[in-house]
Every structure is written in C-alpha cells, then in structure tokens.
Image (cartoon, rainbow, N blue to C red):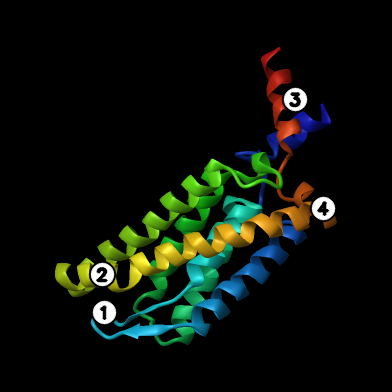
Amino acid sequence: MNSQKSYEKTIFGYYSPTNSISLSLIGIFGALACVITMLIAIPIPATQGYINIGDAVVMLAALLFGPFVGALAGGIGSALADIFLGALIYAPATLIIKGLEGFVVGLIADPKRNGRNLTYRDIIGVAIGGLIMVFGYFIYEIILFGFYAALYEIFMNSLIQYSLGITISLLLTIPLRKGLYESLPQLFEKLFISEEQDFNVHKALNE
C-alpha cells in the first residue's frame, strides 16, 4: 500500500524535482553544464554560436538521475552559459532545446530501470536526445540566419557537439552509476521508485 501511494505521487515513476536532493542535483549539474560549456567555447562567426561540450553534462545528468534533473539542469545551466558568453540571442532557444534534450534522454534511458548497468536504452536515449539538440538549433538558426547558414552550423558545430556529447556522457555514466549506487544508494530513493517497486505496484494494480 505504501509503495502504491508513493507511486501515485510520481510522474513516469520519478518524484517531482522539488525535494532537497533533486534541487541540489539540479544546482550542481546546472552549474557544471554552465562551466563546462564556457570552458571550451569555440566561436562560429557565421551564426554567432560556438562549439562546446556542454551536451555531455546535459546527457550525463539525465542518464544518472532521470528526465526532470536532466531537463532543468541542462536547460538552465546551458542558457546561463549563453548569457555569460554574450550569445544572448541563443539563450531562450537553449533553455527550451537543451531542456527538452535532457528530458528526452532521461525519459528514454529511464535510469530507475537500469540500475548500475549501461543498457541499450541509454544509447537510444542519448542518440535521440542529441538529435533534438541538432535539429532544434537548425530550425532556430534557419529563422535567424537563413537555411544555408543553419546548414553550415550543423556540420561545423551541432554534429560535433552531438558526437562528443554522446561519447563523453556514456563513458562517464558507467563508472559514475556504479560508484553512486555502491556509495549513495539512498540518493536514488529520493529521485525515483526502484524497478522492483515499479513491478510490485503494477502487479498490485492489475490484481
């Protein structure tokens, strides 16, 4: 009964990101996304954008902690980086695009089911979430700069970020998941219900 009541308070099996653990993780990974984005920022004059590896942090947050932490940390942190780097024209779009990227990665990867292992869901999640970033900016840049400038940006920026983000996030997820589950298993109890709880609740509901 307690598990069923807890499940009813979740969305997709994840608790609302308003508890102290979720807010702390959003703050930490939002700051990381901002700093890492700014750390390596190679300007692209044609579109006023820049190459960065911030997507790795967005994806990593979602792979480890789910869609809500991924969305809020990724969107807010990345948008702040745009503001601090003077790319104000991108900040509103970044908030939405990177937020959606983090949400989709976390939703598909569904870390509450993966435990400490890397699975096919993680790979599919970062692949699809990354494509949201690529085509989200493509559409936005068509509106701002026209088709050819936006197409240039895809090959000179977005696809590079896409590849780097996927590679780095997956490589980091393997040791970090294992380490967090071994040293701080209680952390995840504040973020989502376990796969076992999820199974038991659905079983009880179907009886």
Q: Nearer the viewer, mark 4 or mark 3?
A: 4
In the image, what residue type sits under mark 1?
A: Thr
10 Å crowding of disc 4: few (<14), some (14-19), many (20+): few
Nearer to the camera, 68 or 110: 110
Of labels 4 and 3, earlier in sequence is: 4
Q: Nearer the viewer, mark 2 or mark 4?
A: 4
Decide if residue 94 is in sight here.
Answer: yes
Of labels 1 and 2, earlier in sequence is: 1
Task: Say if mark 3 contacts mark 1, CB within 8 Å.
Answer: no
Task: Say if mark 4 contacts mark 1, CB within 8 Å.
Answer: no
The N terminus lies in quadrant: top right
Q: Position of residue 149 (x, y in %)?
A: 19, 74
Real-space Cα separation, disc 4 to disc 1, in angstroms: 45 Å
Using the image, determine if residue 119 lies above or below residue 33: above
Real-space Cα separation, disc 3 to disc 2, in angstroms: 47 Å
Q: Can you tell which mark lies on residue 200?
A: 3
Residue visible at 76% across and 61% down in the picture: 20
Task: Say if mark 1 contacts mark 2, CB within 8 Å.
Answer: yes
10 Å crowding of disc 3: few (<14), some (14-19), many (20+): some
Using the image, determine if residue 164 lies above or below residue 6: below
Q: Quadrant of residue 193?
A: top right
Real-space Cα separation, disc 1 to disc 2, in angstroms: 7 Å
In the image, what residue type sits under mark 4?
A: Glu
Task: Say if mark 3 contacts mark 2, CB within 8 Å.
Answer: no
Judging by the rendered image, the residue that carries numbered circle 4 is 182
Real-space Cα separation, disc 4 to disc 3, in angstroms: 23 Å
Judging by the rendered image, the residue that carries numbered circle 2 is 141
